[in-house]
C-alpha cells in the first residue's frame, strides 16, 4: 500500500527479483509477518482514515455467577466525507479484541438489537496467549460465546424410583470442535493462497435449509424436490440445516449445495430413495418409467457445472433400492465421495441403505464426546470399515439447551472433515503429497480416515488430531503443516 497525494490508500504491485531461494523465502516470511501485524492493528482499533463514532462500556456476558471484566464496544466508521462509500465495523474488547464488519447493515442491527444481530456476522478475534504471543483468527458468534462455558451436569435415570447425577463428560461437542480447530488453523489455506485453487464442493441431501439460519447466505445453490415450484429455501425440521452447519463448522469455505428431498425426519421407504436417486416419485406406480427421470438429488449434484466433490446423506432406508443404487454408483464412478449415515436402530436392524453399499459409500457410525461408540449404532460390520466420529451433544440451531444425537450428525462431521482435508491437498504448496490426485477418491479418503482412527470396540473412531504431531506446538505453523503433509502421504502409501 502507498499513500497518494489525496491522502487516500491505494493498492500497487511490484515485481521483485532475488538471486537465491533462501532470500525469497525470507522476504516472503517478512511480508507474511507484516500482513499479520497490519491485521492485528486493524482488529485492535481505528485504522488510518477511520474514526470512532460510538463507544459504550457494558457488563460482560458471562456464564454462571462469575462476573468478568467490563466489555468495551466501539463502532468505527471510515470515509466520513463520502456517505455512499462509508463503511462501519465494530470492535469489542474484553481480554482481547473481536472485530466485525457491519457495513451497510448497521441500521438493521440497530433495529433488531445487538444480541440478535451477532450470529449474522463473521468475527475477527485478536488474543494474547502465553509469553505475550498475539494471534488473529476468524470465527463466528456461536463459537465465540461458548468459550469458557461450563458443561452442564446431566441427569440419568437409574430406575423408576429416582435419578442420580452423572458427572460432567470430559468434554462437550463444543470442546471437540475447538480441538479440531487446532488442526483447521494449520491446514486452512493462508491468505496468500486463497483463490489460487478450486474450493471443495459439498452437497447435502436432506430436509433442506431454513432461510432464517445465519448461514443461509453460504448456500451456493438450493433445489427443492418436494415442491418444485418453491423458490425459497425451506426446512420444516431443521435436520438438514444442522447437517449443513456441522459441515460449515469444519470447512466454512466450501461451496455448499443443498437438495431438499424430505419433508420430515421420518423417511418414506418407497418415495425417499426415488427422490434421492433423481427419479420422480409417482404415487400410483411402484417403479417409475424412464420418462419420469428428473434433474433431482444425486443426479442434480453431479451434473456438469455443479459436479460436487462430496455428497453427505444423513438418511437411510431399511430396504434396498435399485434406483438409489444406480444413482450412488454413477456418482461414485464419477469420482464423488459419498458419506452416508449408518442408522440409529441399534441392534434392531443392520446399517441403512445406501450406507451398507460398502464399495461405493463411506458408512459413518457415531461416537460420544469420549470417543466411545454410541449406543444407537447398529452392529459393526466384519467385512467393511466401521468409521465412527462424534455424533452426540450438538446444540439445536434454535435452542442451545436442546441437544441432538445421531449417525446423521456424525455423517455431516465426517463429510466436513473430508472436505477440509481435500482442500488442504489442493493447495499449491502441497502437490508433493504422495498420490495427491487420489485423495478425493474413496480409496484415498478411506486410507486417510484409517490413519486417523483408533479402536473403540469394533469401531474405528476417527480422531482428526492424529494428523498432527502428538505434542505439536500451536505457534509452529510451518512445521505443523509439514507434519500434516507427511501424515497424509504416509496414509496414501497404504491406499488401494
Image: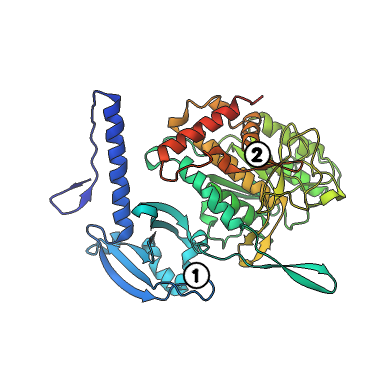
Residue 304 position in % (x across, y down): 58, 34
Q: Position of residue 52 (x, y in %)?
A: 27, 68
Give the label on residue 116, or none. 1
For label 1, count other residues whose C-alpha is less than 10 Å away and answer few (under 14), some (14-19) or many (20+).
few
Residue 343, placed above or below residue 438: below
N-terminal of the pair, mark 1 or mark 2, is: 1
Asked if residue 323 can be seen in this view, the reply is: yes
> Which residue is denoted by mark 2 in the rendering?
453
Corner quadrant of residue 280 = top right
Q: Residue at x 82, y 51 (%)?
A: 346
Disc 1 secondary structure class:
helix
Q: Are marks 1 and 2 in contact (CB under 8 Å)?
A: no
Q: Nearer the viewer, residue 476 or 185?
A: 476
Q: Is residue 381 above or below residue 211?
A: above
Along the viewing direction, whichever of 279 and 390 lies nearer the viewer: 390
Q: Nearer the viewer, residue 312 or 268?
A: 312
Residue at the (43%, 53%) spot, across then down: 138
- What residue sits 50% from the left and 70% below the top? 116
Q: Split into 4 quadrants, where in the image is the N terminus?
A: top left
406 w.r.t. 63: above or below: above
Report the residue at 56% width, 24% height from top: 435
Tell me the mark number nearer the camera, choosing from 1 and 2. 2
Residue 303 position by quadrant: top right
Q: Secondary structure at mark 2?
A: strand
Q: Say whether residue 80 is left or right of residue 182.
A: left
- Residue 296: which numbered mark, if any? none
Give the number of marks. Answer: 2
Amino acid at each position: 500500500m502507498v499513500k497518494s497525494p489525496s491522502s487516500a490508500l491505494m493498492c500497487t504491485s511490484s515485481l521483485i527479483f532475488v538471486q537465491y531461494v533462501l532470500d525469497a523465502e525470507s522476504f516472503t516470511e517478512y511480508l507474511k509477518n507484516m500482513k499479520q501485524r497490519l491485521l492485528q492493528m486493524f482488529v485492535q482499533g481505528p485504522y488510518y482514515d477511520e474514526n470512532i463514532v460510538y463507544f459504550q462500556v457494558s457488563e460482560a456476558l458471562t456464564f454462571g455467577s462469575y462476573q468478568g471484566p467490563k466489555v468495551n464496544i466501539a463502532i468505527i466508521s471510515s470515509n466520513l466525507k463520502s456517505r455512499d462509500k462509508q463503511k462501519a465495523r465494530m470492535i469489542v474488547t474484553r481480554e482481547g479484541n473481536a472485530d466485525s464488519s457491519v457495513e451497510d447493515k448497521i441500521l438493521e442491527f440497530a433495529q433488531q438489537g445487538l444480541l440478535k444481530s451477532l450470529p449474522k456476522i463473521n468475527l475477527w478475534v485478536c488474543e494474547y496467549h502465553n509469553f505475550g504471543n498475539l494471534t488473529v483468527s476468524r470465527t463466528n458468534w456461536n463459537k465465540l460465546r461458548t468459550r469458557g462455558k461450563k458443561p452442564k451436569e446431566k441427569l440419568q435415570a437409574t430406575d423408576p424410583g429416582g435419578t442420580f447425577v452423572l458427572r460432567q463428560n470430559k468434554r462437550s461437542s463444543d470442546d471437540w470442535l475447538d480441538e479440531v480447530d487446532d488442526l483447521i488453523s494449520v491446514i486452512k489455506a493462508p491468505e496468500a493462497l486463497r483463490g489460487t485453487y478450486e474450493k471443495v464442493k459439498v452437497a447435502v441431501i436432506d430436509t433442506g435449509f431454513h432461510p432464517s439460519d445465519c448461514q443461509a447466505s453460504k448456500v451456493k445453490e438450493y433445489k427443492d424436490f418436494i415442491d418444485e415450484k418453491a423458490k425459497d429455501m425451506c426446512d420444516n425440521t431443521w435436520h438438514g440445516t444442522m447437517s449443513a452447519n456441522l459441515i460449515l463448522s469444519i470447512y466454512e469455505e466450501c461451496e455448499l449445495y443443498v437438495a431438499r428431498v424430505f419433508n420430515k425426519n421420518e423417511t418414506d421407504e418407497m418415495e425417499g430413495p426415488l427422490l434421492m436417486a433423481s427419479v420422480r416419485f409417482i404415487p400410483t406406480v411402484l417403479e417409475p418409467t424412464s420418462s419420469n427421470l428428473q434433474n433431482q438429488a444425486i443426479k442434480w449434484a453431479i451434473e456438469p457445472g455443479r459436479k460436487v466433490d462430496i455428497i453427505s446423506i444423513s438418511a437411510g432406508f431399511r430396504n434396498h433400492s435399485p434406483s438409489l443404487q444406480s444413482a450412488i454408483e454413477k456418482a461414485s464412478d464419477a469420482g464423488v465421495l459419498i458419506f452416508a449415515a449408518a442408522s440409529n436402530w441399534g441392534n434392531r436392524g443392520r446399517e441403512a441403505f445406501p450406507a451398507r453399499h460398502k464399495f461405493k459409500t463411506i458408512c459413518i457410525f457415531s461416537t460420544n464426546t469420549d470417543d466411545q461408540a454410541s449406543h444407537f449404532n447398529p452392529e459393526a460390520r466384519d467385512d467393511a470399515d466401521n468409521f465412527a466420529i462424534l455424533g452426540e451433544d450438538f446444540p439445536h440451531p434454535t435452542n442451545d439447551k436442546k441437544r441432538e444425537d445421531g449417525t446423521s450428525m456424525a455423517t455431516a462431521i465426517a463429510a466436513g472433515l473430508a472436505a477440509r482435508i481435500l482442500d488442504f491437498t489442493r493447495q499449491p504448496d502441497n502437490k508433493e503429497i504422495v498420490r495427491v490426485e487420489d485423495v478425493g477418491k474413496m480409496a484415498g479418503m478411506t486410507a486417510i480416515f484409517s490413519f486417523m482412527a483408533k479402536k473403540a470396540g469394533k469401531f474405528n473412531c476417527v480422531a482428526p488430531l492424529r494428523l498432527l504431531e502428538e505434542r505439536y506446538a500451536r505457534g509452529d505453523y510451518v512445521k505443523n503443516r509439514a507434519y500434516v503433509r507427511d501424515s497424509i502421504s504416509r496414509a496414501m502409501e497404504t491406499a488401494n
